């Protein structure tokens, strides 16, 4: 009878283990960090609203009419008809802000994802296989990292006769994946020395299965942190290149092309509506991404978590 009672108690203890008692997922940890950080929460709300407004507004904008020159509407000040005025070509600035913010975000997002994919593949291969493979890949990374990224992008953009958003993303990606590869390699080296990886190798598990089903999930949180912070950096890089004249063509609106209006002294002094909204928007977006990224970073490190 006593053994039966003990068995029933054990069954009750096992039955009390519910999904709520399981360790929280990384997504829940990130959300808790954002909720408990006022700056991160406000930044998340503002950034979400900006993205929604920009993408919804851009869907109602006809890009063909937006880029047309209208000599009768040159440099009009903000009014009821043109909320943000017009530029030196008679184009509505509000519609250009919608299209420009959408293009800048899509370019930064595309570059971030592309660099992340390449960096993860290269870093996983280098850190997991080690030895000659690691030495060969690291020498290539060392060589590429010595090259001036900004200058190379400018040179390539200058050599390409015609390019669009996709081409620009590929050019920026060609030299932007090095940091992602180094981070992934470092974390993969740490994981490769642990017992679960060695046990899988002993059991004869395929290397690619170990890499993508066992090692990669354990470093995903750190990769997400890095990609989140890289998004703001890539957005700033695209804006800077376009401002210097080595980004998107003038006919393709972006925040960089709008900010470049400030390069004209008369616009800088007398027509702030042509460059100030885009400047404030890029600053707000980068700050929001940075604050949210810091919360994501804390969620990935148990020592830095607020909760």
Image: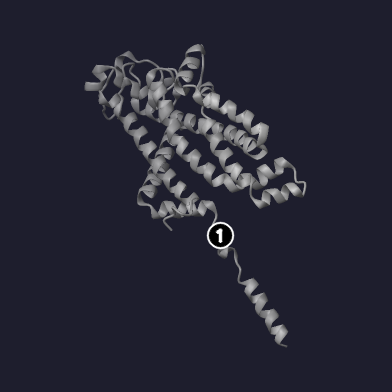
Tell whether 209 sits left or right of 67: right
In-front residue for pair 92/217: 217
Is residue 145 visible in the rendered structure shown here?
Answer: yes
Tell me residue 128's x, y (percent). Answer: 65, 40
Tell whether 17 sits left or right of 102: right
Tell me residue 186's x, y (percent). Answer: 56, 40
Residue labelled with disc 1: 23
In-front residue for pair 136/107: 136
Residue 50: image quadrant is top left
Is residue 66 visible in the rendered structure shown here?
Answer: no
Which residue shows up at 45% across the image and 28% down it?
A: 103
Q: Which of the image's four quarters has the C terminus? A: bottom left
Which residue shows up at 47% across the image and 51% down it?
A: 299
Which residue sits furthest bottom?
1
In-front residue for pair 65/193: 193
SS at circle 1 = loop
Rendering colour mode: one colour
Tell me residue 36's x, y (percent). Answer: 39, 55
Which residue sits furthest left?
270
Tell whether 12 sits left or right of 203: left
Q: Which of the image's four quarters has the N terminus? A: bottom right
Q: Image height check: is 195 above or below 248? A: below
Tell me residue 98's x, y (percent). Answer: 40, 30
Which residue shows up at 51% across the image and 26% down it?
A: 145
Q: How many numbered circles are shown? A: 1
Residue 77: image quadrant is top left
Q: Image height check: is 208 above or below 25? A: above
Q: Image height check: is 7 above or below 89? A: below
| Label 1 Cα neighbours within 10 Å, binned few <14 / some 14-19 / many ≥20 | few
Which residue shows up at 39% across the image and 36% down it?
A: 286
């Amino acid at each position: 009878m006593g053994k039966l009672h003990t068995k029933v108690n054990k069954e009750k203890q096992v039955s009390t283990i519910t999904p709520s008692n399981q360790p929280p997922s990384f997504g829940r940890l990130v959300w808790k960090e954002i909720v408990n950080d006022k700056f991160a929460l406000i930044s998340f709300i503002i950034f979400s609203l900006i993205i929604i407004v920009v993408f919804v507004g851009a869907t109602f904008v006809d890009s063909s009419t937006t880029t047309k020159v209208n000599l009768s509407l040159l440099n009009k000040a903000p009014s009821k008809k043109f909320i943000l005025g017009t530029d030196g070509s008679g184009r509505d600035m509000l519609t250009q802000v919608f299209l420009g913010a959408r293009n800048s975000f899509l370019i930064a997002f595309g570059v971030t994802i592309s660099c992340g994919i390449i960096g993860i593949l290269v870093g996983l291969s280098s850190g997991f296989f080690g030895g000659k493979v690691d030495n060969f890949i690291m020498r290539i990374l060392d060589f590429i990292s010595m090259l001036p990224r900004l200058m190379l992008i400018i040179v390539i953009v200058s050599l390409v006769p015609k390019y669009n958003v996709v081409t620009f993303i590929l050019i920026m990606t060609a030299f932007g994946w090095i940091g992602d590869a180094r981070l992934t390699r470092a974390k993969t080296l740490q994981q490769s020395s642990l017992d679960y990886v060695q046990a899988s190798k002993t059991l004869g598990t395929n290397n690619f299965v170990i890499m993508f089903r066992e090692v990669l999930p354990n470093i995903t949180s750190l990769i997400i942190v890095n990609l989140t912070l890289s998004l703001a950096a890539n957005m700033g890089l695209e804006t800077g290149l376009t401002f210097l004249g080595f980004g998107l063509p003038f006919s393709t609106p972006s925040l960089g092309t709008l900010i470049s209006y400030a390069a004209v002294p008369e616009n800088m002094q007398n027509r702030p509506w042509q460059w100030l909204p885009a400047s404030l928007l890029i600053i707000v977006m980068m700050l929001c991404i940075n604050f949210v990224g810091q919360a994501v970073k804390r969620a990935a490190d148990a020592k830095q978590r607020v909760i």
